[in-house]
Image (tube, rainbow, N blue to C red):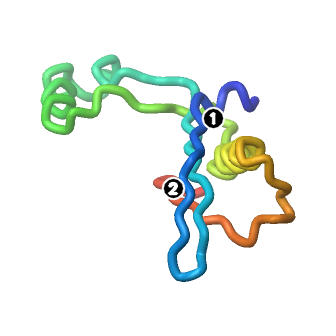
Amino acid sequence: MNSQLCNRSDAGLNLTLLGISVAGVVTCLPASKVRNLDLTGNISAEDVTQVVKATGVETRYVAPIEAKTSDLCLKAARDLLDLLNWSPKSVGGVILMTQAPN
């Protein structure tokens, strides 16, 4: 299932502030992309076009129905640990930002 979940991982940040160090930032987006202009089921094509024009959001990433936010987070965390060559036991904390609950 991991190949369906993530299409991008990034690291390379190294920031220390007030004794707290941020060594990397990673993202994990579902691999499946949907064009908003193709979503005209209950909404007219004209309305969809207006929303796309107003927001600039042309595509959305869509996770498989069985995937949870925690699946994306776990994949991102493992990718970051691999990129940094760190053991999971060496991490003191993780900050998560999401728009969707599990």
The percent coordinates of residue 47 (x first, y second) are: 16, 29
Res 63 → quadrant: top right
The percent coordinates of residue 77 (x first, y second) are: 70, 50
Residue 83 is left or right of residue 54, and the answer is: right
The answer to whether residue 71 is visible is: no
Dot 1 amino acid type? Ile
Ranked by sequence position, the earlier of labels 2 and 1 is: 1
Camera-nearest residue between 15 and 77: 15
> Residue at horizontal 75%, vertical 29%?
1
> Residue at horizontal 15%, vertical 29%?
53
88 to 92, vertically: above or below: above
Q: Secondary structure at mark 2?
A: loop
Q: How dense is the environment of label 1, judged by Cα within 10 Å: few (below 14), some, or many (20 and up)?
A: few
For the residues bearing labels 2 and 1, Cβ distance under 8 angstroms: no
Which quadrant: the C terminus? bottom right
Residue 59 is left or right of residue 12, and the answer is: left
Camera-nearest residue between 63 and 2: 2
Dot 2 amino acid type? Thr
Q: Label 2, on which residue?
A: 98
Q: Secondary structure at mark 1?
A: loop
Residue 65: mark in rendering = 1
60 to 77, vertically: above or below: above
